[in-house]
């Protein structure tokens, strides 16, 4: 019998936890590495929870199926039963597992390229915290090396429950007369969304299903997808276009003109439509959240769902309804909320469907674009440099933090004056003009992200494009 130590296998793999979940190259996620993470995860929570089953689901990446089999083998080695839900959105897996009071593992790399993948872990009470991540990495458990992978049969119960979670909130005629496009690509939820929107009365047209994995990044929408949405809107006379990232926890929605909405604007409109009192949002979100004055209290966090979720417990002690969302659009419901006389249970993990449906509900009497235009006019644009070493990003930002004015001059902005900087996550430079420039190394891949906020989209886009073109060629400051 060949035995392995989980902490040693994980450390030697080079895989690390990113913004949400463990991420790495597909070549790093061997069967033994997947098993090591699974054993460590179960060992780290077994004294806190009583369970006999573990649920597993995957996205549409080519590598995800074998990774799930390795995780399932590890679960079986522990004498636990596996419930395999196949290809499924992450929030659907999390929701059903929380109702069943069992842990779950999602095999997904979210929006990162197909040569990478990842694992997301959920305790019976929800998404793991940063402290839980350390617990997994530091847990020493001996396990039998994985040599054969089990066949897994797909259970459809989580998919059904996920659709019912939302269709039960609204009248089946809510979307009568609406024409909705579903940009399917390789989204983990693509087989659910058409029937979900049709169940609410919409005429639905499916678009661009792909047999190859498409790494949709909802914070950095590709030019080709910007053009597609406008073309589709004109060609099909859509009222709304819906899509998600790879694992279905980040929405990408377009208005009746084919303009993609920023995720934080979508989250704001969703929270307002749900009459949410207080919000926890990452520091990268648009400041319109404060300037619109629609919420009693707003707290800012580091970027990543674990940091947003960590704020929910404190907020729930003082307020009735609590939620959060990220600049990527993922909406996190931190408390039970009543909608149309029905109770929707808390789901403190990113979800793509709830904000889309709440936006459509809010737009019954007016267009989506008018809802957006009624907000204070602050615009965010973001993009990233891919294949940009994290160590290089960190070194550049370390020097920029020391002398932000000189950093801006090196970027060609001699006339910019810095009012203050925010180091909550990366480097956020607030200018005297009111514009904001925010840099952050990605927690999931070797990328440097840049966000710019301004009073016009053209200026925000200009800032990001100029800055990233300059930074790309930095050797040193």
Image (spheres, grey):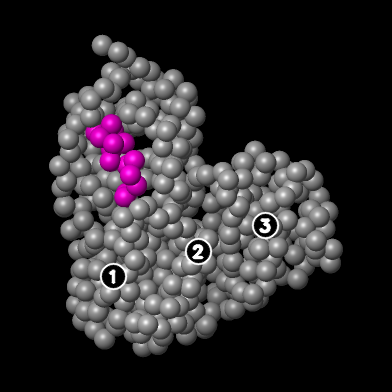
The reply to whether dot 2 and dot 3 touch (C-beta < 8 Å) is no
Write the start and end of the magenta stretch as one range: 59-72
For mark 2, give the secondary structure.
Answer: loop
Q: Can residue 268 be seen in this view?
A: no
Residue at the extreme top? 1
For mark 1, give the secondary structure.
Answer: strand
Q: Horizontal and vertical percent for residue 102?
A: 24, 41
Which of disc 3 and disc 2 is earlier in sequence? 2
Q: Mark 2 points at which residue?
A: 221
Residue at the extreme front? 211
Circle 2 Cα neighbour tier, 10 Å, few/some/many (<14 / 14–19 / ≥20) = some
Q: For residue 361, what is the image quadrant?
A: bottom left
For the image, the number of numbered tags is: 3
Q: Which residue is drawn at 47% across and 52% down?
A: 308
Q: Is residue 373 shown left or right of residue 158? A: right
Q: Mark 3 points at which residue?
A: 468
Work out whether 175 lies above or below 80.
Answer: below
Q: Can residue 161 be seen in this view?
A: yes
Alpha-carbon span between mark 1 and mark 3: 35 Å
Q: Residue at x 70, y 63 (%)?
A: 466
Q: Name the residue under label 1.
A: 206
Q: Is residue 80 shown left or right of residue 368? A: left
Magenta span contains residue 153: no
- Judging depth in this view, the residue of 419 and 17 nearest the camera is 17
Magenta span contains residue 70: yes
Alpha-carbon span between mark 1 and mark 2: 19 Å
The reply to whether dot 1 and dot 2 touch (C-beta < 8 Å) is no
Q: Horizontal and vertical percent for residue 257?
A: 45, 82
Alpha-carbon span between mark 2 and mark 3: 16 Å
Q: For residue 355, what is the image quadrant?
A: bottom left
């Amino acid at each position: 019998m060949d035995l392995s130590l989980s902490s040693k296998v994980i450390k030697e793999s080079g895989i690390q936890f990113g913004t949400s979940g463990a991420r790495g190259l597909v070549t790093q996620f061997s069967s033994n590495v997947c098993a090591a993470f699974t054993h460590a995860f179960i060992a780290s929570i077994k004294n806190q929870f009583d369970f006999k089953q573990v649920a597993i689901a995957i996205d549409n990446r080519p590598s995800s199926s074998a990774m799930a089999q390795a995780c399932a083998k590890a679960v079986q080695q522990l004498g636990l039963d596996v419930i395999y839900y196949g290809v499924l959105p992450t929030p659907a897996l999390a929701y059903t597992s929380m109702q069943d009071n069992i842990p779950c593992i999602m095999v997904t790399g979210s929006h990162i390229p197909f040569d990478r993948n990842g694992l997301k872990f959920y305790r019976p009470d929800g998404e793991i915290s940063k402290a839980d991540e350390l617990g997994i990495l530091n847990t020493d458990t001996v396990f039998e090396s994985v040599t054969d992978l089990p066949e897994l049969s797909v259970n459809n119960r989580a998919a059904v429950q996920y659709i019912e979670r939302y269709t039960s909130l609204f009248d089946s005629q809510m979307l009568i007369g609406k024409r909705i496009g579903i940009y399917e690509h390789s989204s983990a939820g693509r087989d659910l969304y058409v029937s979900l929107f049709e169940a609410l009365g919409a005429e639905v047209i499916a678009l661009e299903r792909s047999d190859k994995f498409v790494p949709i990044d909802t914070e950095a929408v590709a030019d080709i997808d910007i053009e597609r949405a406008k073309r589709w809107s004109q060609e099909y006379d859509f009222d709304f276009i819906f899509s998600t990232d790879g694992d279905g926890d980040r929405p990408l929605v377009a208005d009746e003109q084919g303009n993609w909405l920023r995720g934080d604007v979508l989250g704001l409109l969703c929270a307002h439509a749900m009459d949410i009192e207080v919000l926890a949002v990452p520091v990268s979100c648009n400041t319109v959240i404060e300037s619109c004055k629609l919420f009693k209290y707003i707290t800012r966090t580091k970027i990543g769902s674990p940091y947003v979720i960590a704020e929910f417990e404190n907020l729930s002690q003082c307020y009735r309804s609590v939620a959060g969302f990220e600049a990527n659009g993922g909406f996190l419901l931190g408390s039970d909320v009543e909608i149309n006389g029905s109770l929707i249970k808390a789901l403190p993990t990113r979800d793509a469907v709830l904000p889309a449906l709440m936006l459509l509900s809010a737009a019954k009497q007016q267009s989506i674009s008018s809802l957006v235009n009624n907000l204070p006019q602050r615009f965010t644009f973001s993009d990233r440099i891919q294949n940009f070493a994290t160590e290089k990003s960190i070194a550049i930002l370390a020097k920029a933090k020391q002398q932000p004015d000189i950093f801006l001059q090196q970027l060609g902005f001699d006339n910019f004056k810095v009012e203050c900087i925010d180091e909550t996550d990366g480097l956020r430079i607030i200018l005297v003009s009111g514009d904001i420039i925010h840099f952050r190394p990605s927690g999931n891949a070797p990328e440097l992200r840049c966000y710019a906020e301004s009073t016009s989209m053209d200026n925000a886009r200009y800032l990001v494009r100029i800055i990233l073109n300059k930074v790309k060629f930095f050797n040193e400051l």
